[in-house]
């Protein structure tokens, strides 16, 4: 506490006392005089000390003298408590006195409380006196001159007669000066320091702008030739890792629009079967299925300029239709990132393929079955630096693991010991329907549905050491597990308990706990349709899911692990996630929905009743915006949907950007009144590190791939046209 704060507290106390000079007032004035005297003596001691201990010019000019007080508890020195007063020079300039900066201190102790005297006769109640005025002290730093040749402090005190909490010039009663001593002589020069290490040269280079963004532009790169990360120090070349800043300049508007007319003129390169795609920002690669009208539906990719090229004609005499069943997936392997997909080469049937992004590296994993190994019952998931997938053929449903170069039965995976593999092979003889409707991998476990001869269609867990655990959720029949997600060190899924469909949590050791026992509203009949469209999602400790709880339409619910509470998040938002896959940023889930007042639009939830509501009504009123695809990227929610733009015109299906429930048209491939690009009719939204890709019809080229440049990338460029 500073001396000014102490004086302010004294001033507030003075207002509550009489202005007449009583014996009690005299005692208080005496105590105040003692404290001020001790303070002035301490300050004078510091001044003398500074005069005896020379300081450098820099410290004297930049350091200030500080006075601090600190309350003191009762001890051997002050039996009734009191205060310590410290004074010193603020050498480090932080506005506080550290221990080594204190040059003088003194103690002011409270007097011992006297014994209570005999109670006197109660006097007559007098008239309340006026509030007294507080006393104030101002400390002002003095520059060298008069009255202090070497600078110092001016101390002014007085009574705050106008009670404005400031000591005005007319209120000053006493003025004292505490002057600094004369500056000491300079000390001896210190030793020269060692020479620093040789610095690295600054480099600048100029590169052409990437044509995928700008066909007439330049990128100026600035960096240091220090070999940081993957660079080479001192070689005179500015490597990518050595770049510190870049200036990107384009002499025309950055390009966004159709990527290329793959099926020339008005032909459609995409269709209801030929549309799957995948992008990976780590290696800047975009693979997709497309047809040029000559080679059929085959595997294509975008080169460094975002120009579409056919990666491989897998079925030379027909359509290979990459990703028709399993889509296009990625997997991390010991050899790097690989893409996997199903395709038909016209000889071996529909099998699993792998690609490293080159024609020679695009190969069939193996002819696993006679005819089609992959059918509509097949499932796929990433696990143990590879992927696990199921096939269905003459030998029934089987489960495999591959990293693109090695493909084997899951029971004989290369990391398993021979004894573990032998045990698994024996156990697997009683299993069928492997992966039916459920196959999911986490860091250490593979969860899958399978039919076991004794317990029926149930959940199985295989850990990385080769231990197989079976969960008998429905002891008298099939639990038929379906929707599932990894959660709370285990698995949360939807399964049958013998009466209906409920949520259950499985731990990794064979234990299970039913989380819900829901019945239809107003009945004792268990619900039979749970997570039919939206599926399962987690926000915080809550599982978010949809249930047909009343009538025929599903509504949104949440289950809290912390409280075990089950809450309906909205009774008016119907059919959540009915047509689209939902998206989330970890705090909010967005999904298509139906409301009586808006039709089919976008809704959102954060897992609370208050945070579950309509996101935006793109087609205001009862008309539906008919959203086709959703994506959250670049801190923005993107949707392909109809809407009324800022001019009041129906945009048709266009790319909308939504931020804080405010929607704007980001890109409309087919502008004009009455024109509809039907964006998202085929395929969805795919994001790379720079673009959002989708399929749309611009009215000239048919359904082709389009690109929209992310706002964060646009902001990196200086554009003039």
Image: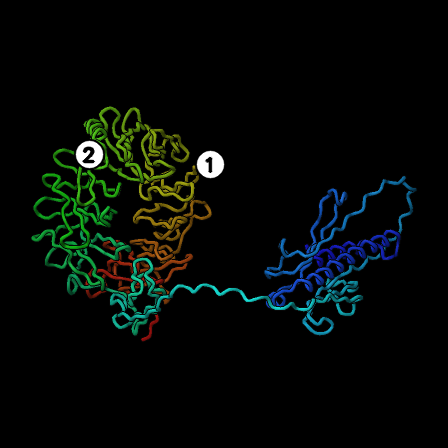
Report if residue 271 is visible in the image.
no
Report x, y in % for residue 605. Answer: 41, 48
For disc 1, the neighbor class at 10 Å (few under 14, some 14 to 19, many from 20) is few
Q: What residue is at 76 percent from the left and 59 percent from the top? A: 41
Q: Earlier in the sequence, mark 2 or mark 1?
A: 2
Per the image, label 1 sits on a secondary structure element best described as loop
Q: Is residue 521 above or below residue 185?
A: above
Residue projecting furthest to the bottom: 721
Image position of 440 (left or right of 63): left
Q: What residue is at 74 percent from the left and 72 percent from the top? A: 147
Report x, y in % for residue 618. Answer: 36, 58
For disc 2, the neighbor class at 10 Å (few under 14, some 14 to 19, many from 20) is some
Q: How many marks?
A: 2
Per the image, label 2 sits on a secondary structure element best described as helix
Displayed quadrant of residue 225: bottom left
CA gap, disc 2 and disc 1: 43 Å
Report if residue 638 is visible in the image.
yes
Q: What residue is at 38 percent from the left and 37 percent from the top? A: 488
Displayed quadrant of residue 178: bottom right
Kindly identify which numbered label has been placed on residue 412: 2
- Indicate the quadrant containing the N terminus: top left, top right, bottom left or bottom right: bottom right
Who is closer to the viewer here, 169 or 693?
169
Image position of 263 (left or right of 541): left
Q: Is residue 504 above or below residue 670?
A: above
Residue wearing tag 1: 563
Displayed quadrant of residue 560: top left
């Amino acid at each position: 506490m500073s001396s000014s704060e102490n004086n302010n507290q004294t001033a507030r106390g003075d207002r509550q006392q009489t202005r007449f000079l009583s014996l009690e007032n005299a005692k208080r004035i005496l105590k105040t005089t003692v404290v001020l005297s001790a303070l002035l003596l301490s300050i004078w001691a510091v001044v003398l000390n500074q005069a005896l201990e020379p300081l450098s010019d820099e410290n004297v000019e930049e350091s200030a003298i500080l006075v601090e007080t600190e309350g003191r508890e009762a001890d051997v020195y002050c039996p009734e408590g009191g205060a310590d007063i410290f004074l010193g020079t603020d050498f480090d300039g932080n506005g506080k006195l550290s221990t080594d900066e204190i040059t003088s201190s003194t103690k002011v102790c409270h007097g011992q409380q006297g014994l209570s005297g005999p109670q006197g006769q109660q006097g007559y109640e007098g008239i309340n006196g006026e509030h007294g005025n507080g006393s104030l002290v101002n400390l002002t730093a003095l520059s060298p001159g008069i009255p202090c040749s070497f600078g110092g402090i001016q101390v002014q005190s007085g009574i705050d007669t106008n009670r404005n909490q400031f000591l005005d010039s007319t209120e000053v009663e006493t003025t004292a000066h505490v002057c600094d001593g004369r500056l000491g002589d300079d000390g001896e020069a210190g030793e020269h320091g060692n020479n620093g290490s040789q610095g690295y040269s600054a480099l600048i280079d100029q590169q052409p702008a990437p044509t995928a963004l700008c066909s007439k532009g330049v990128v100026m790169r600035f960096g240091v030739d220090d070999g940081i990360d993957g660079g080479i120090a001192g070689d005179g070349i500015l490597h990518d890792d050595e770049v510190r800043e870049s200036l990107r300049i384009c002499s025309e508007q950055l390009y966004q629009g159709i990527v290329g007319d793959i099926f020339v003129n008005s032909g459609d390169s995409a269709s209801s079967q030929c549309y799957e795609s995948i992008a990976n920002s780590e290696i800047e690669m975009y693979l997709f299925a497309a047809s040029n009208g000559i080679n059929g539906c085959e595997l294509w990719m975008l080169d460094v300029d975002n120009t579409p090229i056919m990666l491989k004609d897998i079925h030379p005499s027909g359509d290979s239709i990459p990703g028709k069943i399993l889509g296009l997936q990625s997997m991390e392997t010991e050899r790097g990132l690989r893409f996997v997909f199903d395709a038909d080469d016209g000889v071996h049937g529909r099998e699993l393929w792998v690609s490293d992004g080159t024609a020679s590296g695009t190969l069939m994993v193996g002819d696993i079955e006679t005819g089609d190994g992959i059918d509509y019952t097949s499932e796929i998931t990433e696990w143990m630096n590879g992927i696990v997938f199921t096939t269905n053929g003459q030998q029934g449903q089987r489960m495999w693991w591959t990293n693109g170069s090695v493909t084997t039965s899951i029971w004989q995976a290369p990391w398993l010991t021979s004894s573990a593999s032998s045990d698994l092979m024996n156990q697997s003889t009683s299993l069928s329907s492997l992966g039916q409707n459920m196959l999911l991998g986490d860091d250490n476990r593979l969860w899958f549905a399978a039919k076991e001869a004794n317990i029926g269609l149930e959940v199985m867990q295989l850990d990385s050491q080769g231990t197989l655990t079976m969960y008998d959720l429905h002891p008298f029949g099939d639990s038929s597990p379906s929707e599932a997600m990894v959660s709370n060190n285990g698995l949360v899924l939807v399964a049958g308990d013998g009466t209906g469909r409920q949520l259950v949590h499985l731990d990794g050791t064979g234990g299970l706990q039913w989380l819900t026992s829901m019945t239809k509203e107003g009945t004792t009949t268990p619900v039979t349709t749970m997570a039919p469209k939206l599926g399962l999602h987690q926000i915080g400790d809550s599982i978010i899911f949809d249930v047909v709880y009343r009538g025929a339409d599903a509504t949104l619910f949440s289950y809290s692990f912390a409280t075990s509470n089950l809450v309906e998040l909205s009774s008016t938002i119907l059919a959540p996630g009915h047509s689209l896959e939902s998206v989330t940023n970890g705090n909010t889930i967005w999904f298509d929905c139906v409301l009586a007042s808006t039709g089919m639009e976008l809704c959102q939830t954060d897992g609370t009743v208050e945070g579950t509501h309509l996101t935006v009504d793109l087609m205001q009123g009862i008309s539906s915006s008919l959203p086709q695809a959703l994506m959250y990227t670049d801190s923005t929610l993107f949707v392909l949907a109809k809407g009324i733009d800022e001019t009041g015109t129906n945009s048709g299906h266009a790319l909308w950007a939504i931020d804080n429930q405010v929607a704007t048209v980001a890109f409309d491939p087919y502008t004009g009144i009455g024109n509809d690009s039907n964006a998202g009719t085929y395929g969805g939204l795919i994001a790379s590190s720079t673009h959002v890709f989708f399929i749309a019809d611009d009215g000239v080229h048919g359904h082709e791939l389009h690109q929209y440049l992310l706002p964060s990338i646009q902001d990196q460029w200086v554009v003039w046209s």
